[in-house]
Amino acid sequence: MKTPISRHFNYEEFEFSQKANELGIDNQIPSDKIRFSIRLLVLNLLEPLRKIIQRPIIITSGYRCHTLNKAIGGAKNSQHLAGEAVDIHCGGALEVLFLAQVVLRHKLPFDQMILHDSLLHLSFKAHGHQRYQILYNKSYKEAQL
């Protein structure tokens, strides 16, 4: 049975990782503190975004334990480790820009937005001010050429 966070999202979506499954890594959320951070991310950013676009949002990477983060070459200080970040998409490469525009147009709160060629990284800090930082991954820039 799935543990709901909101109408459209559950904790199991944040734990699921194909890479973790392949490598036999346990990527279960280990603490209530991380669950709380994920809940804030969903309620403040993902669920409002989902309601605006009125179609499913696919989580490709949510919470990452240290072992998984290291295995995929994630940043040592990745917000995924704290449950404050998610990588999403809702279709093809053009959808990345669409999602980013919706977030900005509707002034949804975020700490960091990173556009990749096939996904959008969004984060929401559980404590402190959101930076509203927008970055472009090398893969996104190359896809636009």
Image: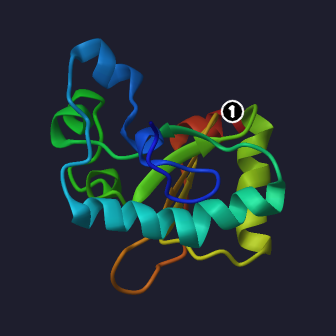
| 141 on left or right of 42 | right
Which of these two is toward me, 139 or 37? Answer: 37
**Residue 95 image point, x, y percent:** 77, 42
Q: Is residue 79 above or below residue 25?
A: below
Q: Is residue 121 above or below residue 127?
A: above
In the displayed image of the protein, which residue is found farthest to the front?
1
Location of residue 101 (image quadrant): bottom right
Image quadrant occupied by the C terminus: top right
- Residue at which label 1 appears: 143
Q: Residues within 10 Å of mark 1 (few under 14, many from 20)?
A: few
Q: Is residue 100 above or below residue 143?
A: below
In the displayed image of the protein, which residue is found farthest to the bottom?
129
Residue at the (60%, 60%) spot, across then down: 46
Location of residue 88 (image quadrant): top right
Residue at the (36%, 39%) spot, across then down: 15
Q: How many marks?
A: 1
Q: Is residue 145 visible?
A: no
| 15 on left or right of 116 | left
Kind of residue at disc 1: Ala
The local secondary structure at tag 1 comes to helix
**Residue 27 image point, x, y percent:** 25, 35
Q: Is residue 19 visible?
A: yes
Residue at the (33%, 81%) spot, across then down: 127
Which of these two is toward me, 20 or 139? Answer: 20
**Residue 53 image point, x, y percent:** 82, 55
